[in-house]
Image (tube, rainbow, N blue to C red):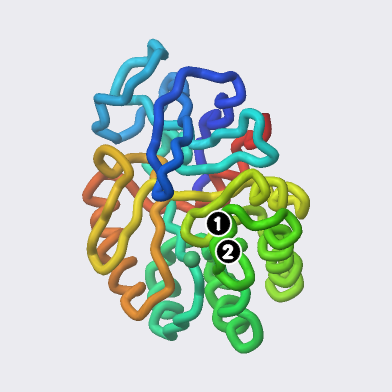
Amino acid sequence: MAVPVVTAIAVLALGLAGWRLLDGNGDTTTLADVATPSGERSTTTETTVPTTTTVPEPSITVGALEAKGRPVPVVFRIGTFDPVVFITVDDGGIQRPELVDHVRRTGVPITMFLTERYTSGDGVDYFRQLQDLGATVQAHSITHTSLRGKPLEFQTKEVCQPVDSYERDYGVRPRYFRPPYGNYDTNTLLAAQSCGLKAVLWWSATYNDGQLELQEGPLRAGEIILLHFNDHLSQDLETLVDRIEAAGLRPALLDDYLDAAPVSP
Ligand SMILES: [Zn+2]
């Protein structure tokens, strides 16, 4: 696996000028600018990103961490100058054998955010097969209930119980949590922090049944793309990777880039 070039996505704590991204729940989250290191150029054609830095365009990518004042950062997009995007797949209730074949054949790197109620028991063998092929296991609650507004104790169980059970089942402790429906609040972040999680993950794009929807702009380096385990996931992965490559990008493993980035203020 190629060594990723990770740029400093956690400059957010420095309070650099940001702009607003509207999430699906009407909240706004500040994204920070990231300076461009010399020598590395993104293939993105984005030229309209507002910025207060002096680096030449189009080499600007978007830092995705909002860590300032929060127990753990919330990540929407990775700031990187590698021409990479990140495929994440949620839930796990539908476990099609052809997906395993597809991942084995293509080697496409995916980060799995599994809902414990769908993935315990017999499901463990299925996701272990994907794990053996390079996919990683992250947490996506026990019951897939919306966490926003729920008490800390309730949220802590939903966030942290799968972290422990996945560590037992898959031999690796999850490092990230994705809230069901993207709904989180401060208690979600406190819960994530309490069981050692490093970040709460959102996304900057979705792909379903051939339809790519982006939060803003064209597909570019650093996008975190959300898919789901469903009946057409293999086909979606096939066509999505074609689209990624047509944009001059390639899929990479989210964990490699996020783990290497400084995610704490
Ligand atoms: Zn979900």
Task: Establish if 162 lies above or below 248.
Answer: below
Query: Does the beta carbon of the residue at mark 1 sit less than 8 Å from ligand 1?
Result: yes
**Residue beneath label 2, please?**
140
> SS for tag 2?
loop
Which quadrant of the rendered structure holds the C terminus? top right
Residue at figure coordinates x 37%, y 25% from the top left: 60
Foreground residue among 247 and 163 = 163
**Residue beneath label 1, please?**
178
Residue at the limit of the structure toward the top, as seen here: 54
**Residue 226 lies in quadrant:** bottom left
Residue 253 on image: x %, y %: 50, 54
- Give the amino acid at mark 2: His
Task: Establish if 194 lies above or below 155.
Answer: above
Foreground residue among 234 and 154 = 154
Foreground residue among 121 and 27 = 27
- Give the amino acid at mark 1: Arg
